Amino acid sequence: MMGHNKLLSRFGRGWKSSRFTVRVLVSRGFSFWVVAIVVVATVGASTLGTASASPVLLVDYKALNYNATNGVWTDSSGNGDNATVPVGTTAPTLMANATPNGSSAVSFTYLEYLDIATGLAPGSGYTVLAFAEPTEAVYLDDNLVGGPSGAMAYRIGPTSGVNYQLLGNDGTTLGTSNTGVPTTAFSMIGVATDNAGKATFYFNGNADGTTTANDLFTSSINLIGARGSSATGFFTGNVAEIQIYSGVLTTSEVQTVNQAFTNSYITPVPEPASLALLAVAGVGMLLLRRGKKLGVLLNDQGSLLNGQK
């Protein structure tokens, strides 16, 4: 009978809370009914594991989405939080063939910076990751990101040469990276800090120093390439991409981003001619397979022999 060969299933009424979902499933097969209660754990957007907030990508600025004509750097995170050149200031330029694989980068010089449309509140902290190339021989106070008094800043500081520093809410240096960042090459640089300034620095995906500071951030990040209420400490260099997350990414997560940067800006991009050859080869292989299935063979001269030799 059909009932012996077909299993009928349907979802019954479900109950859901912020921590779990309960569903009742009723199934009939052969000559019996099965009733099961399934409890499905629900991990909210605000939890990571059982203890900490899950980092969320707040903004993602890629050089390919920068318009040098109007000074708008479109946010590709999906949040629509674009960065724009302030009225009365000069917009950074777009440099072609800047990265190792020929991708573009946004080029900042003195007095050039961008405002983030909606400031990024400190919440549970930040992770700032960038694929960038500092280009100044001597750094005084060059901030990659920053904000008004009370906000964190991430900079190459005057007391650290070409090492990066995390600044606290009053401009105090909370910590310094271990590695001096090269000024003639692109690197992945970053910092992951909780809201009290306890941070890990990163260089090319590897942990590069820590700080155990206790200095609560109280204001939002709202600047790319500067810091302060009236904008100061301008960054000089090229930025292919910068991502800012709420919360603290793990080392493994940072390494995943680093690999994505490597794929986007270091791994060679196939030439159009190479892509065309690959496409032709693929089509040729497909036709050959289909030809064999139909019993159509190609002889050495390339003519068609319908099943004949």
Image (cartoon, helix red, strand yellow):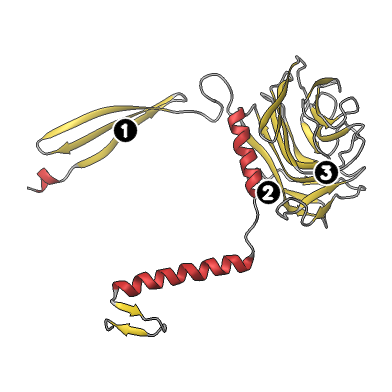
Q: Secondary structure at mark 1?
A: strand
Query: Toward the viewer: 234 or 185?
Result: 185
In the image, taking residue 14 as reference, residue 109 lies left or right, namely right
Image coords of residue 79 (percent x, y): 65, 43
Of callouts 2 and 1, the N-terminal one: 1
Residue at the limit of the structure toward the left, as seen here = 1
Q: Which quadrant would the C terminus be assigned to in this image?
A: bottom left
Tell me the distance, in whole angstroms, between the alpha carbons under discs 2 and 1: 52 Å
Whether residue 77 is visible to the viewer of this picture, yes or no, is no
Q: Is residue 226 visible?
A: yes
Q: Along the polypeptide, which appears first: circle 1 or circle 3?
A: 1
Q: Amino acid at mark 1?
A: Arg
Marker disc for residue 266: 2
| Of residues 122 and 245, the one drawn nearer to the viewer in this rendering | 245
> In the image, is 196 to the left or to the right of 137?
left
For residue 13, which numbered disc appears in the image? 1
Identified at 78% across, 57% down, the residue is 96
> In this rendering, is residue 216 above or below 308?
above
Q: As drawn, is 229 to the left or to the right of 96?
A: right
Q: Residues within 10 Å of mark 2 (few under 14, many from 20)?
A: some
In percent of the image, x 62 and y 60: which residue is there? 270
Q: Position of residue 254 (x, y in %)?
A: 63, 33
The disc label shown at residue 241, or none? none
Q: CA distance from mark 2 to mark 3?
A: 15 Å
Quarter assignment of residue 156 = top right
Q: Nearer the viewer, mark 1 or mark 3?
A: 3
Label whose residue precedes the other's in the sequence (2 or 3):
3
- The residue beneath circle 3 is 184
Q: Residue at x 54, y 30 (%)?
A: 45
Relative to residue 308, is residue 93 depicted above or below?
above
- In this rendering, would 148 be left or right of 3? right
